[in-house]
Image: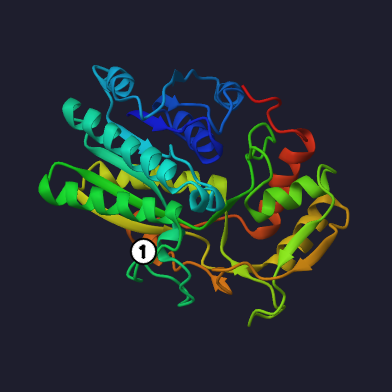
Amino acid sequence: MKVLVTGGAGYIGSHTSLCLLEAGHEVVVIDSLVNSQLESLHRVQQLSGRNIDFHRVDLLDAPAVEAVVAGAGLDAVIHFAGLKAVGESVEKPLMYYQNNIVGTLNLLHAMDREGVRTLVFSSSATVYGASEEVPLTEKAPLDATNPYGRTKEQIEDILSDLSSADSRWSIALLRYFNPVGAHESGLIGEDPRGVPNNLLPFVAQVAVGRREKVLVYGNDYPTPDGTGVRDYIHVMDLAAGHLAALDFLKSTAGTFRWNLGTGRGSSVLEVIQAFSQAAGCAIPFDFAARRPGDAALSYADPSSALADLGWSALRDLARMCQDHWRWQRDNPFGYGEPN
C-alpha cells in the first residue's frame, strides 16, 4: 500500500513510518515541522534502508495539502498531525480548534476528492475525560476536560458522521493511552520541545542531567502508593496497532473505535523506580500538590483490539524504560537544535 502519514516526523509518526516501511509499504509524509524535526525521518530511512517522500506542509494550507494528495496514488492515510499540549490548549483554545479541526477538514476534503477513503486517526484516551471507571472500554462516555481532548472528541464525531453519510469510508479511531519508550536502536525517540508535558520524557531528562528533579503531583490519591496510576504503552506496540488497524480497514467499511493500551496501570513512583533501574542511577523527585482535573487512575480495557485486530501490547514497563533510556542516553539533546 501507499500510505500518507501526516505528522510523520513526530514521535509516534516516525516510529509508525518505520514499521510501515519495514512491512513493505510506500510512505509519504506531510509534516509542518512545528513540533518535530526532519532528522527523525533521516534516521527512519537509515534504519529501514528505504526512502520516504517528504513534504513540508501545514494542514492549514489547503491548496498545499491538495497538491500532495492529488495524483499521488494513495491507498490510505494515517493522521497524526496536530497540536497536543493540554496546558497550551487551555491557554490558546482558538489555536487548537483552528489547527486540529480545520487541518483535519482540509485533509478530508483532499482525500475525498481523490477517492482515498481509508483513514486511521490518532485519537486519545483524553476523550474519556477524568473518568475513574476502570478499566476504560470503548463504550465509556466521552467527556474531554480540555480543548486538546475536545478537538479529538470533535474530530471523532466528524469522522463518524462522514462514514455514516458515505459508506465508502473505512475509518479507525485509535484511542491510546500514554505512549513511551523508543525504537530499540536508540536512533529515534521522543524529543519534546521545551519542558516535557508528560512524565517519562521528564524523568529521562532528569536521568541524563538536563533537569534537576521530577515533581510528583499528588501523593494522597486512593492508589497503592498515593500517586496517580496510568496505562503506559511502548511506542513500538502503538505503531504495530496502527498497522493492524490499517490491515483491518482494507476489507471493512464504517467507523471503528479501539483502545490501545496494556490494560495495566503503573503509578508515578513505579515509573520512577523502573527508570532508575534502567538508567542505573537514582532519580530525584519531590512531591507537589495535585493538579486540577487529574484522575487518580486510568487504564485501558484493550480486549476489543485483541478480538478485532489480533493486537496486544507486548512490551512491559521495564522494557519501555530501557528503550527510552537508551534513546535519551545516546541523544541527550534529542535530534539537536530545532529547524
- Please tell me whether residue 286 is drawn above or below residue 310 in the rendered image: below
* Colouring chosen for the image of the structure: rainbow
- How many circles with numbers are drawn on the protein? 1
- Please tell me whether residue 179 is drawn above or below residue 68 in the rendered image: below
Residue at 62% from the left image edge and 67% from the top image edge: 291
Q: Position of residue 170 (x, y in %)?
A: 22, 45
In this image, 235 relative to 258: left or right? right
Q: Position of residue 5 (x, y in %)?
A: 40, 32
Residue at 55% from the left image edge and 45% from the top image edge: 236
Q: Position of residue 323 (x, y in %)?
A: 69, 45
- Please tell me whether residue 53 is drawn above or below residue 332 in the rendered image: above
Q: Quadrant of residue 214?
A: bottom right
Name the residue tied to disc 1.
Answer: 304
Numbered disc 1: secondary structure: helix
Residue at 29% from the left image edge and 17% from the top image edge: 67
Quarter of the image with the N terminus is top left
In this image, 230 relative to 115: left or right? right
Q: Residues within 10 Å of mark 1 (few under 14, many from 20)?
A: some
* Amino acid type at mark 1: Ser
Q: Position of residue 18 (x, y in %)?
A: 51, 32
In this image, 20 relative to 63: left or right? right
Quarter of the image with the C terminus is top right
In-front residue for pair 160/100: 100
In-front residue for pair 280/331: 331
In this image, 267 relative to 108: left or right? right
In-front residue for pair 137/104: 104
